[in-house]
Amino acid sequence: MTLELGVLVSGNGSNLQAILDAIAARTLDARVRVVVSNQPGAFAVERARQASVPSVVCSHKDYASRQAFDQRLIELLQEAGAEWIVLAGFMRILTPEFMQAFKGRVLNIHPALLPAFPGTHAIRQALAYGVKITGCTVHWVDSGVDSGPIVLQEAVPVLDNDTEESLGERIHRAEHALFVDALRKLSQGSIAPPGQA
Ligand code: GRF
């Protein structure tokens, strides 16, 4: 099936780019219906523009509550015809109302081998802890932070002289392939949403 995607972003958007590139190369059967950024300056928005994909900036700061912001996100995504929601570096926690609206249809990518190092500083924490192997995880989103059923993982070795930057670069490269792979498997029916396996 063709996946109708809504992609939520907050920053650089290199994962969004990997998805757009795979669609353009016809190695992923999907359409990005809309990219929504909560950060006005996010480079991800420029990437969407360059790919002629609709994008919307919707700043959480313009809303009185998390619920009101998420309600607007739900509207934007539904109006655009998004059926599957991809969190590609989206730095906001979603409400139970949002999760209910897209139950079992929200995927996230995280730069660590969950359940190790959840949260915003996964790469720094992996280095500080001294793990020899870290990686990245694609998972279904539930109501927790970086929790929910794991879909795919890729291991990335930590090298002796790694910095946050050098390790981050290798993890990002692994992420791009892994996220596209997960979406491809979803479109081909070889992975199923939680509860439907
Ligand atoms: C990625 O490392 C992802 O795992 C995390 O946020 C980062 C987003 O990077 N959730 P980018 O904006 O896709 O380049």
Image (cartoon, helix red, strand yellow):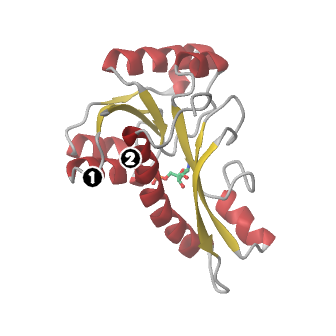
Q: CA distance from mark 1 to mark 2?
A: 8 Å
Name the residue: 78% across, 74% down: 130
- SS type, badge 1: loop
Q: Position of residue 157 (x, y in %)?
A: 62, 76
Q: Which mark is residue 38?
A: none
Residue, disc 1: 27
- Indicate if the residue with disc 2 has its beta carbon within 8 Å of ligand 1: no
Quarter where residue 94 is shown: top right
Name the residue: 62% across, 28% down: 195
- Residue lying furthest bottom in this view? 160
Give whichever of discs 1 and 2 has the lower sequence position.
Answer: 1
Residue, disc 2: 184
Task: Mark 1 and mark 2 in contact? Answer it, CB < 8 Å.
Answer: yes
- Location of the C terminus (image quadrant): top right
- Location of the N terminus (image quadrant): top left
In the displayed structure, does residue 100 sit left or right of residue 145?
Answer: left
> Between 122 and 81, which is closer to the camera in this rendering?
81
> Between 53 and 147, which is closer to the camera in this rendering?
147
- SS type, badge 2: helix
Q: Position of residue 109 (x, y in %)?
A: 55, 48
Residue 162 visible at all: yes
In the displayed structure, does residue 67 sit left or right of residue 119?
Answer: left
113, above or below 92, in the image: below
Residue 65 visible at all: no
Q: Position of residue 15 (x, y in %)?
A: 42, 51
